[in-house]
Amino acid sequence: MAKKTPINLRVNLGKLKLKNPVMTASGTFGYGKEYSEFFDINKLGAIVVKGISLKPMKGNPSPRICETPSGMLNAIGLQNPGLKGFMKQQLPFLKTLKTKIIVNILGNSVDDYIELAEAMESVGVDAVELNVSCPNVKKGGIAFGTEPFAFEELITEVRKRVKVPLITKLSPNVTDIKQFAKIAEDSGSDMISLINTITGMSIDIRTRRPRIANITGGLSGPAIKPVAVRMVWECSRTVKIPIIGMGGIISPEDAIEFILAGASAVAVGTGNFINPAATIEIIKGIKSYMSTEGITSVNDLTGAMRCLKDRL
Amino acid sequence: MLSVDSSLDPLLKRPISLHRWLGNGDFQLLYRVVGKGTDILSRRNPGDKLDVIGPLGNGFSVSRKHGEPLLIAGGLGIAPVFGLAETLHSKTPPLLFYGARTAKEVLCIDQLQSLGINPIIATDDGTLGKKGNILNVLNKFITQNPKLKDQYAIYACGPEPMLKAVSTFAVKNNMKAFISLEKHMACGVGTCLGCVVNTTKGHKRVCKEGPVFPVEDIVW
Ligand SMILES: Cc1cc2nc3c(=O)[nH]c(=O)nc-3n(C[C@H](O)[C@H](O)[C@H](O)COP(=O)(O)OP(=O)(O)OC[C@H]3O[C@@H](n4cnc5c(N)ncnc54)[C@H](O)[C@@H]3O)c2cc1C
Ligand SMILES: Cc1cc2nc3c(=O)[nH]c(=O)nc-3n(C[C@H](O)[C@H](O)[C@H](O)COP(=O)(O)O)c2cc1C
Ligand code: FES
């Protein structure tokens, strides 16, 4: 019998080297502690923690979430303990982990982002993700993520100040996401992650009230997956920097779809709520898909979608 | 948190209280069909497997230093309150005030009586027990026996308006009270921050720091 070649799940996102391509999506995994009670979170490729701002944020009033067909709306309002709170309460635990730590940051000005990025670099986090696309809070980044000039300035200025790998998280709430992907690449972002939630809304027709207090919220979960896969595919044909794909991934098949569309790594968000061990099952599932398909390195799957027409 | 099935709609797990611990890892749930998820659940067959994570959060913890337990259940709030009554009854049967919309929705009465607990009942339509609100019944009871105020601490679960009334009642009568809150939940383990309640110490997660809170902590 032929000797089985070992399956290689390692991916290099520029300087950021992961043991496997599966990470968590910001805001769905807290700061790691909660899910560490369910499984060994060191097995993950990386952990992306809930967004951090300079000052603590209280977030939105409740109800903050509601379920929609195959998805959910959320308007958490970026509740977080702020930079100091993060350093004191969350970082010590994260430091004990044997996986990569990526901190999602958000601010109201370029200076906020610079201060946060520098602080994260100084404590040795593995990468910083710029949340320029969270659609929930009026000032919480929407201008950066959907306005090309502010977007470009932000990435350029943060890039000048830090060496830590930078991930720019793209908002899907734009007409042409490729345009933003290209600006991110040209402004020095090491990679892009997409998609953040799609702005949505739901009304209880009995009470005639919006089903979340903020009225609008971000749609996530399987409902948004086809949109996300399309956007990953479009971006992968536009930029050369690595792409972290997300939006509705709950199974290994979902994750593989994103990789075939052009993602080098994937993140699981709402899927963690449905199954706390989703990420681990996805890692296993990717491995068994690779062995069935006779693929030894997961990198060979990135962008390996077969098109009907070559010109595509 | 419980998945009613493995389909994508409904997507999220549903929060259901532990009704009774039976030992050996066995437990019972008590739920009402109110929507799609609970409807699907009610159609599952004996022997089917369900995906459940739990127990989650803090649950009621009764300390006699606060006084003897006085339990209040509103509607399906009887689910966890019954479990609490069952664990407490071996010492002294707790006082139980139980409000529901109508007689048909009053549950667990035989089991309660077999534990030696005779609940004081009120229904909105008067089909069982006193007619009207259970808080009015409690108010009357305490007014007639003012000494009980110092001897009892309140543990309550039910719809939010009832819990708010319990809170007002407890503050007015200077009684210690703990209430079990309900919020819409997504993760159930403290990561999504979807279920928070406003407290004197900031937003707290009902699924993690709760669902049981001392009334004085809640900012209504
Ligand atoms: C901590 C906690 C413990 C609970 N314990 C029990 C229990 O022991 N037994 C029981 O029958 N129910 C319990 N509930 C309520 C139960 O979770 C909801 O009835 C259930 O999620 C409804 O699901 P559905 O798909 O059938 O309804 P949906 O179709 O989702 O909704 C139907 C109606 O129920 C309301 N609803 C939906 N989710 C909730 C929720 N989480 N809380 C309150 N109302 C909701 C909706 O607003 C809507 O009006 C508990 C809720 C919480 C937060
Ligand atoms: C409850 C919740 C909170 C979120 N918080 C953040 C956040 O703080 N920062 C951020 O960049 N994205 C946040 N997101 C977006 C997710 O990271 C992810 O981009 C999106 O949910 C799509 O992936 P999914 O369908 O797998 O959940 C949040 C999503 C959810 C559901
Ligand atoms: S339900 Fe997610 S934090 Fe409570």
Image: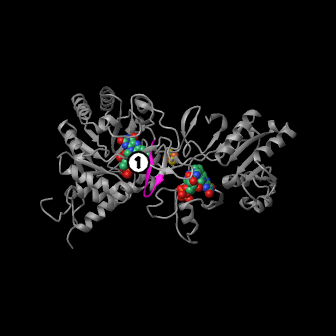
Chain to which mark 1 belongs: A
State the image quarter where residue A277 is shown: bottom left
- Residue A257 appears in which quarter of the rendering? bottom left
Amino acid marked by disc 1: Gly
Crowdedness of circle 1 by 10 Å Cα count: few (<14), some, many (20+)? Answer: some
User: Where's residue B212, x and y in %?
Assistant: 63, 44
Question: Which of these two is toward me, A211 or A50?
Answer: A211
Residue A129's x, y, as percent? 31, 39
Instruction: Report x, y in % for residue A270.
Output: 41, 51
Ligand 2 falls in which quarter?
top left
- Does residue A108 appear to the left or right of B99 in the view shown? left
**Disc 1 on helix, strand or loop?**
strand
Q: Which colour scheme is used?
A: one colour
Q: In this view, does A265 lie to the left or right of A96?
A: left
Region rendered in magenta: A67-75
Residue at horizontal 22%, vertical 31%? Answer: A156
Quickly name the residue at label 1: A200
Location of residue A190 by image quarter: top left
The vertical placement of A39 against A107, above or below, is: below
The tally of labels here is 1
Q: In which quarter of the image is the N terminus of chain B?
A: bottom right
Q: Can residue A29 be seen in this view?
A: no
Q: In which quarter of the image is the C terminus of chain B?
A: top right
The residue shown at (46%, 58%) is: B11
In the rendered image, residue B199, in percent from the top left (x then y), is placed at 58, 35
**Residue A52 within the magenta-colored segment of the rendering:** no
Check if residue A68 falls in the magenta segment: yes
Image check: A103 left or right of A260?
A: right
Most common secondary structure along the magenta stretch:
strand
